Image: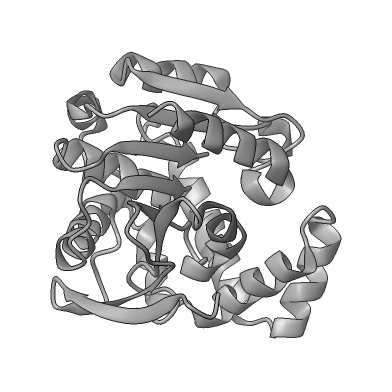
Amino acid sequence: MSSWKSDYVTVNKIKLHYTRTGGDKQPLVLAHGVTDDGLCWTTIAKVLAPDYDVVMVDARGHGRSDSPKSGYGPASHAKDMMGLVTKLNLQHPILLGHSMGAMTTLAFAGAYPDIPRAILLEDPPPWWVINTASAEAAARRTELQAWMEGIKRKTHKELVNEQRTSAPTWSNAEIERWADSKQRFSPNVIEVFNARNDSSVDWQKLLPQIKCPALLITADPARGSLVTKDGAAALKSLIPQLKIANIPRAGHSIRHDQLEAYLHAVQTFLAKL
């Protein structure tokens, strides 16, 4: 890690922070979920760095990136990602995203279909099948906003202790990085859950534009993962080349819950490119 580079690029009038493992290798960009940041990918980056130039970006409002008041929808995140790819001169990068970052990855691959070499999606919120105007969707947004506001009131020690209890399979290092990220994200990030963002992308039109190989990693809805079998099938109907890997005994943060199985799914897919 001592050779990893930490720096900034200016895109769309904001500074984005990133950490990069470097080397003359296939670029692989990692896009984190809401309230996380780039360093939450450290464990995965360590494994993949020998074969890939891994770029862990802090999305706007997260980590050490700027936090404007707006621009937290998937279309804006995809534009930020394109700015990063352009500024760093990443040629046909592979993108791996979790949750919000997976939606950024989908929006990016649909808007710029000739750019990505491949995409990998860790339990994205299934907006391609959600009625964003429904009372259920509104209630979920309110619940998530309250969760984010609650996090910002907690100390680092409280976050660590609570996560250690609720996620006993996570390593201490992962819990520490998770708690660090919660201390760093901006309150402006709550804009992610603005109803306008849910309807800002026509997923039914955008997703069929994706041309590159794609992998969807799903887990167990009973443990909190978001993509059901029906949701995965609906995404495959929009992206016919999509491969699906289900990892049991894992929730929304699949890589933290079942690291070995997650790495096997990722590395198997990447080896076939």
Looking at the image, is 173 positioned above or below residue 229? below
The image position of residue 228, as x and y in percent, is 56, 25
Quadrant where the C terminus lies? top left
Name the residue at 58% across, 32% down: 265
Which image quadrant for residue 55? bottom left
Residue 106 image point, x, y percent: 31, 39
Residue at horizontal 78 percent and vertical 62 percent from the top: 171
Q: Position of residue 144 (x, y in %)?
A: 53, 57
Residue at the extreme front: 24
Q: Is residue 67 visible?
A: no
Q: Which residue is located at x 14 percent, y 37 percent?
A: 114
Toward which corner of the image does residue 234 lie, by quadrant? Answer: top left
- Image side of residue 143 versus residue 210, left or right: right
In the image: residue 61, left or right of residue 227: left
| Side of 57 relative to 204 (left or right) | right
What residue lies at 30% left-to-right and 62% top-to-bottom? 72
